[in-house]
Image (tube, grey):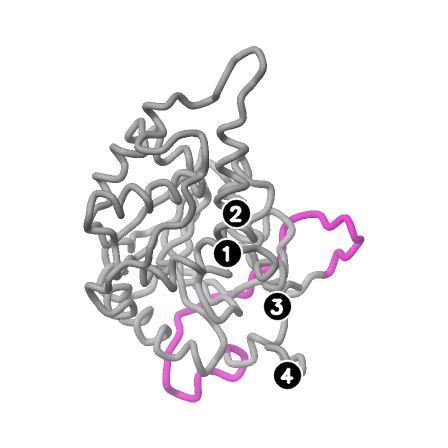
Amino acid sequence: MPWEPPKGETAADPFATLRIGFAGRVELPTGELLAEQSTRIDGNHDPGPLCWISKEPPSAQLLATLRAESGSNGLWPLLLVDDTELYGDRCTVGVVTPEPRAHIDKWQPGQVMSRIWDGLCQIDSELGPAYDEDSLAPFGHSCPGLAPTGDLLADSTVLANQLTQRLLDEQTRLGLVPVPRGADALTVLGWSGATNHVSRSAGLSAMLRSWEERFGARVLRLGPDRLDLSVAAPPIRAEHAAAVAAEHWTFAPDRIMQDTGSISAYAEEIRGRRQWTFWWD
């Protein structure tokens, strides 16, 4: 089970709040605890639950209430959505072996960006570079590094609450994950959405943590191959947007190159945009 207590604290049931209720403060819809679906190489065939998920779509107001409660109950609320027709049940949760939050701590976001950038720009001795200079403009084949911190245009939590309503549909469910921040959910849940890009999600979670801090980003919705974020401090200036777009390219190259064709074109798309959406093939 990937859940772990904070340093200095003894282990406890992270879902105890659910078992005893929220002391009358929050009324949850019907739901269930979901466990890991992957086959562990360590022989552990009885993993603990990864998250709680509702059986019906939640209301935006419930998400707002649970965000306010998350600091006291240790459960982070987000939207989970599965395309059961294409992927089967519960595809978002536990498809790959979940990792503990400590694995995220091992990664620095700049290190993740540089490592992926260098891999994407690796030159084949016969085929040449995978990406031409035009698609990488205004940068070249050398990683430009992390973008500067953005200026807050809104309160991060208020914006997340406002944008939640747009993402609700009949396939969307409420997920409660035993993590202190949304960035960690990808890793702790054993999410498989980016496995064609990276084998594990800890590095992506490290980048998301940095976006939470630099851009007021909040994880809103997680799907089989999609991630939606609210962004309270988006880039406004063209130069800043290009630097942020470079980070996004290493995070989800399919989203940038297949939708816009270049980092510079994508940079124009995200200027002032308060919602970032990523997808992976």
Q: Residue furthest top?
A: 126
- First reached walking from the N terminus: tag 1 or tag 3: 3
Residue 17 place in picture, x, y as percent: 51, 81
Please provide percent x and percent y for residue 3. Answer: 61, 68
- Which residue corresponds to mark 3? 3
Counting from the top left corner in percent of width and height, residue 118 is at 52, 34
Residue occupied by mark 4? 9
Residue 70, numbered label: none
Calculate the distance from the C-alpha at mark 3 to the C-alpha at mark 4. Answer: 13 Å
Instruction: Characterize the local packing of mark 1: few (<14), some (14-19) or many (20 or more) Cα atoms within 10 angstroms.
Output: many
The residues colored magenta run 18-46
Residue at the spot x=50%, y=56% of the render? 206
Mark 1 sits on what residue? 206
Which mark is nearer the camera, 3 or 4?
A: 4
Q: Which of marks 1 and 3 is in front?
A: 1
**Are the residues flagged by discs 1 and 2 in contact, CB closer than 8 Å?**
yes
Whichever of callouts 1 and 4 sits on the residue coming sooner in the sequence is 4
Mark 3 or mark 2, whichever is nearer to me: 2
Can you tell which quarter of the image residue 78 is in?
Answer: bottom left
